[in-house]
Image (spheres, grey):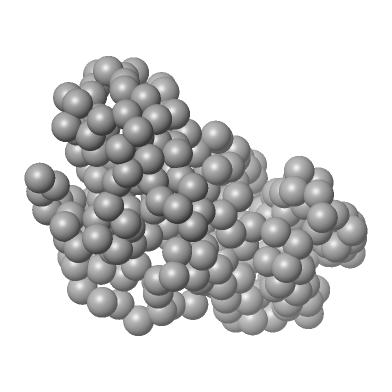
Amino acid sequence: MFSPVESRRLYRQVADQIRLMIASGELAVGQRLPAERELAEQLSVSRPTVREALIVLEVEGLVNIRMGSGIYVVRQHAAGAAASEREPVEGPFELLQARAIIECAIAEEAAGCARPEGIAALDEALTRMSGGVNDAGAVIAADRAFHIAIATIVGNATLIRVTGEMFDMRMTPYFEKLASHFEGPTTWRSAVEEHRAIRDAIAAGDAAGAKAAMRAHLTMSQKRFSESFGEELPGEEKRGRRKAPAKGKTKT
């Protein structure tokens, strides 16, 4: 039987439990797992947590998520798989929270010191984003360039490095598989408009507006991500199992 789990990064705990059940044979190859909603109820977690865990297992090749059919075990795997074969330590919601804290402050600072060349760099990245919404690789590269350009306006090498590192944490098989469930031309067009609002506030020297626009962008990114699972923002995972109001996901 599945056992309720309580911990930070719950999706990793869920993945570990299912992985052990597969390794022990309790879940056999070819067996259909319970539906996401049922798994969430049995494990006492949200459906987004279950989906994150299942995508970890899908990337590892243990399960196959068949839309409209269910989740099936496709092979067994040693329970002691190397950590390098598994998902990153930070989950997507945790990463977005960190980005919101850090990048909102960077955008606020950039609005107070932006020069024409800095705004030009933002405009160049926006042009590339607008023209690349049908090409995931191109739009992600332009998205990264935009966020790096904001940190570059501030001129702090540490902030530039940290911004790039946080963005690059999504460039893993796990995050790419996760993104495939919710990213596309429509979501990227929305993200372009959110980026444009950030750019305009910085260009106008509006520090409070730049901070608010960055927060709105990252909040909408998380909302898009959450809605792909049919759920609201997973506040209970971050607030000791409490429901939390949506704050100002997820386009990166």
Q: How many marks?
A: 0
Q: Residue at x 80, y 58 (%)?
A: 133
Instruction: Name the one closer to the observer, 155 or 220.
Output: 220
What residue is at 55 percent from the left and 68 percent from the top? 224
Between 184 and 36, the residue placed more toward the observer is 36
Instruction: Name the side, left or right, on which 196 lies relative to 179.
Output: right
* 225, above or below 132, in the image: below
- Horizontal and vertical percent position of residue 106: 59, 61
Q: Residue at x 69, y 80 (%)?
A: 206
User: Relative to residue 252, is residue 89 drawn left or right?
Assistant: left
Quarter residue 129 falls in: bottom right
* Residue at x 49% of width, y 77% of height: 248
Q: Does 247 sit left or right of 139 as displayed?
A: left
Q: x, y (%) of residue 210? A: 65, 75
Residue nearer the viewer, 113 or 179: 179
Quadrant the N terminus occupies = top left
Query: Which one is in front, 134 or 214?
Result: 134
Q: Quadrant of residue 221?
A: bottom right
Q: Is residue 222 visible?
A: no
Vertical position of residue 231 compared to residue 134: above or below:
below
| Quarter of the C terminus within the rendering | bottom right
* Residue 239 in picture, x, y percent from top left: 24, 67
Q: Is residue 44 in view?
A: yes
